[in-house]
Every structure is written in structure tokens, then in C-alpha cells.
Amino acid sequence: MPIPLPDLDDRSYADLMAQATALIPSLDPAWTNHNPSDPGIALIELLAWLTEMLMFQVNQVPAANTETFLKLLNGPDWTRPPGVSLDDATRQTILNLRDRYRAVTAADYEWLALNAWPQSAQAGQLGRLARVRCIPRRNLSATDPAARGADAPAHLSLVVLPAAEQSETGLYEALWQFFDERRTLTTRHHVVGPAYLPVEISANLALHDDAPPQQALHDASQALVDYFDPWTGGAGQQGWPFGRAVYASEAAAVLERVALVSYVEDVQVTASGAADRVQPDAVVLEANELVQLGATPLVAFDARGLRYQATP
């Protein structure tokens, strides 16, 4: 049903008469006959009746006005479909206003990229997105590394991870154009792919008595690759989260879940070429980064103390 309209003036005939007669003593003290038979009172009654009729008309919105309002909301080319009542057209327009179209907040950008972009014609040609992350006040498309890391008021960057095995050719440009029609006027938006930080994990694996060493090392390495995968990794298998640190304790938990491994010792996480990212028992990632798992120098040892390393 349409939104109920408020009364612009809810005074009744009785209210108008009471207000008018209350003014008589101050305006004309000699006028003392306020009975309906008095010609002046009859004139006031006539004017009150006409005023009540005018106020009733003021509270009515003509159908032509409603059509004009709907055209303002739906666009200048909008026309009411044949067979659709004015009330139904109004209802549908109000429902459409609740759909997200304008990108204002970071959540708007992420929602539109994952929900509205797949419905666009460009998405049918360029493919869907696996995950996105909107980072306000950052220009990650800058060529200067210092500029990418600096605070950038009025800028925001949308970090896009395409679906696995999908080409990035033309995708970022099309997404930039998609959001250019939806951004606020003062926003400078950028669409980029994720950055990858090479992370290395080393550990010593104690094996069960009957565990084949090379198979155990292979299974352990594969478990780490699967867990830190950008598309299917993480605790929820929805992909490793953007900017989430890599903890030695978490890597140890992954290795201990390998069937052939009894327990794990000396787990270390490092980042080649990024010593400033390495903290005790963790490697810190930037908000736009994902893990690129590098070498995993795992060593296995059995109950006899024999040590094994993965064969090349």
C-alpha cells in the first residue's frame, strides 16, 4: 500500500468557526449578536465552509502529480507499464529505492561488487569475483610504494580477487567504470588486484611409527598450501582473508591435523625480503595482501630419530 500522506491542515469547519468568532470582540466590540441569524455570522459560516473545502483539496495529491514524482525517482524515460495501477507503481518504486545502487561506504562497494556487478553485462564477458576488500583513504594504484602506503583523503581502493583461473584482462577497468557511475562526486576510487607476500613456513614433524616419511612430508606441505590458498583457504574454506597475519601457532595446528603426523616442533614463519613484517611467531600482512606460500622446509623424524626431508 502507498505511504499514508499527512494532513497539511487538519482544521475542521467547527475549528474555523470557533477561531473566527473568537476574533470578533477584539476586531469589532460593537458586534454583539453572534447568532446564526446575524448576516455577519452567516457570512463567516460561508467562508468557513469554503475554507474547509480548499483545505480538503490541498490534502489531495492528483494522479498527474504522483506520476511526475515517480518519473523523478525512476528517471526521465520512465513510464507506467500498461495494466499497472498507480498504487502498484508507487509500491514498486519505493521497493526499488531500498536496493543498493549508490556506493558511499566501504560496505557499499563490497556489496555492489559481489552482488550488483554479477548482474551487469560486463560481468557476463569478464567473469565474476571471488572476493573483494575495500580500503578507504588509500591509493593502491599509485606507482610509488610510499604513495601506496600513505594516507590519501578522498581516495579509496577496491582490492579484487577474480575467480580462480580467470583472466584479469579488462576486469579492473570495467569495474572502475561500473563504480564511476555509483560513487559520490568527491570520491576518487581505484580498482586493483591483491598484492602477495611470500611467506615461508618451516617445522619439524614427528611421525607415527608406520608413517611413510615422504608421503607425510608431501601431505604436510599440501595441507599448508590448501590452508593458505587465496580462493579456498582459511578456517571457513572461503579463501585466506585479506590482510590476515600468518601465525606460527596456526600453521602448527594445520600440520598436526595431518593424519601421518604425531606432533609438531619448532614451527617458524618468515617472509623473504620483508624482514620488517616478521614478528615473534607471526608475519604481518597489509590490508590488501594475501599469502603467497613459498618454500616449506619441513623435516620429518620417526621414533628411531631418523630425519627426512622432502625430495626435490
Image (spheres, grey):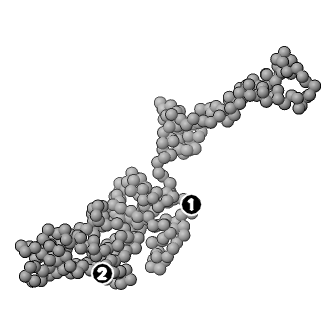
Q: CA distance from mark 1 to mark 2?
A: 43 Å
Q: Residue at x 38, y 70 (%)?
A: 243
Q: Is residue 200 above or below residue 191?
A: below
Residue 229: mark? none
Residue 185: mark? 1
Location of residue 261 in the rendering, given as x and y in whole percent from the top left corner = 14, 72
Q: Is residue 73 above or below residue 64?
A: below
Q: Is residue 155 above or below residue 89?
A: below
Q: Residue at x 88, y 32 (%)?
A: 26
Q: Is residue 13 left or right of residue 110?
A: right
- Image quadrant holding the C terminus, namely bottom left
Q: Residue at x 51, y 34 (%)?
A: 1
Q: Residue at x 17, y 81 (%)?
A: 299
Location of residue 12 in the rendering, given as x and y in whole percent from the top left corner = 71, 27
Q: Secondary structure at mark 2?
A: strand
Q: Is residue 170 visible?
A: no
Q: Is residue 264 left or right of residue 196?
A: left
Mark 2 residue type: Thr
Asked whether 63 or 248 is in front, the reply is: 248
Asked whether 79 or 275 is in front, the reply is: 275
How crowded pointer 2 is (Cα within 10 Å; few <14, some 14-19, many 20+) is rated as many
According to the image, label 2 marks what residue? 270
Mark 1 residue type: Leu
Location of residue 302 in the rendering, given as x and y in whole percent from the top left corner = 10, 79
Q: Is residue 147 visible?
A: yes
Q: Which quarter of the figure has residue 282?
A: bottom left
Q: Is residue 52 left or right of residue 67?
A: right
How crowded pointer 1 is (Cα within 10 Å; few <14, some 14-19, many 20+) is rated as few
Location of residue 187 in the rendering, given as x and y in whole percent from the top left corner = 53, 63
Q: Secondary structure at mark 1?
A: loop
In the image, which is nearer the foreground, mark 1 or mark 2?
A: 2
Instruction: Say which label, 1 or 2, has the lower sequence index.
Output: 1
